[in-house]
Image: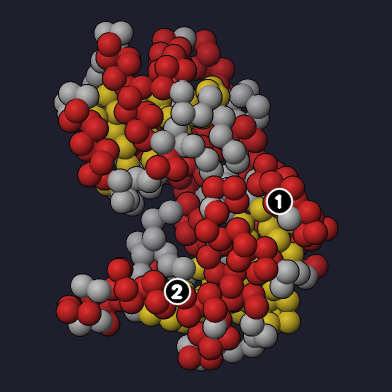
Amino acid sequence: MKTIRFSITNLGGGGAEKILINILKHLPRDEYQISLFLFEKNGIYLKCVPNDIAIQYFIDPAKFPKWVKLFYQILIKKFAFRLLMHFPSLVYKVCGVKYCDIDIAYIQDTTYLLKTNYAKKKLAWIHCDIKNTPFFTRGLKINLKYADKIICVSQDLNDELCNTFPEYSFKSINIQNPSELTEIQALAKIEEFKYNPRTIVSVGRLTRQKGFDVLIRAIKVLHDRNLNYSLKILGEGADFDQLQELICQLNLVDYIELLGFKSNPYKYMNAADLFVLSSRYEGFGQVLVEALCIGVPIVSTDCNAGPREILHDGECGLLVPVGDVEKLADGIELLMTDIKLREKFIARGLKRAQDFDVSQIMVKIKTLLAEV
């Protein structure tokens, strides 16, 4: 039986974290003994880790006294991450990590751990657009030298990696994220309701990457055209106050809501007339697969990387230029009003979503692990 260890910074409410839980659930226990290493032991998905998986961690914020927590984000966490970057073997030793067959750095931030001698084989899983993470570019290049295989979650990301680090192209492959389509569809129908007026839903971390500022301004453009659509944004993040201020400045308080993180975003997506992804960049765009399988029409920016691949070059959803407020507003108006186009996208999208089902993607992941 092979021993496999996954490492990730934490299990916060992001797409990569959610997908990792899917993978952990579906790896066969008769073939693999699985463990999980966390830089910090926290996150909404922590409770979703299967009970038979051993969890080790470097820091646990919950154990700090209140006065220490005041300095956690600004000092302690940053210092601890510098230790992980520069002394990864020491971090593993302090945490009592043991030698394993396959060590998997499941997120770019933990690729520093690949420099240790705690595994027979090492894999790096890349979820982020490399060009938009300049802080890690130099460190990432060094870290990836120690990986036996590099898994990119979209073809665009794979191409970008090969162009940025051509010396690693021989060990880079594309395996898309697995989605629990049946579970998503069931959760979407737990509570059926309808918004009034017509409503757009978007989901993601409240950061500049997701382009919610552009989406909010597009809603303002539509209101100036007397199209008073509403917008619900699900997610949490550092830009909450900034986005709320923009909503107030544009006099859209009655039409736009920041709903925070929702454990079941699918019922909100199912009730929407339209789903919009307004990102400036992605690594894959997992939420698009989820919207496809629920059967909600999609408008997405044609950003790097993932949306064009998921939406099959625009056959399953409308692609608009990145950061263009007017074009995004035009796309929303078109797909809200063109019934035939909506129906065509929904039908094609439901079929396309099957390509990303966990049953399909896990075959590729198991094949990779067997080959390694």
- Quarter the N terminus occupies: bottom right
Q: Nearer the viewer, residue 350 or 61?
A: 61
Q: Nearer the viewer, residue 252 or 82?
A: 82
**Residue at x-position 80% and y-position 59%:** 167
Q: Please, what secondary structure does the residue beneath circle 1 have?
A: helix
Residue 8 in the image: state x and y as whole percent. 50, 68
What whole-number distance in Å separates the C-alpha atoms at marks 2 and 1?
25 Å
Q: How many marks?
A: 2
Q: Is residue 99 visible?
A: yes
Amino acid at the residue labelled 1: Thr
Position in image of residue 5 (x %, y %): 59, 76
In the shown orientation, is residue 297 left or right of residue 265?
right
For the point 17% across and 23% down, the residue is 251
> Does residue 258 appear in the picture of this structure?
no
Q: Position of residue 61 (x, y in %)?
A: 30, 76
Residue carrying label 1 = 164
Residue position marked by numbered label 2 in the rendering = 81
Local SS, label 2? helix
The kind of residue on which mark 2 rests is Phe
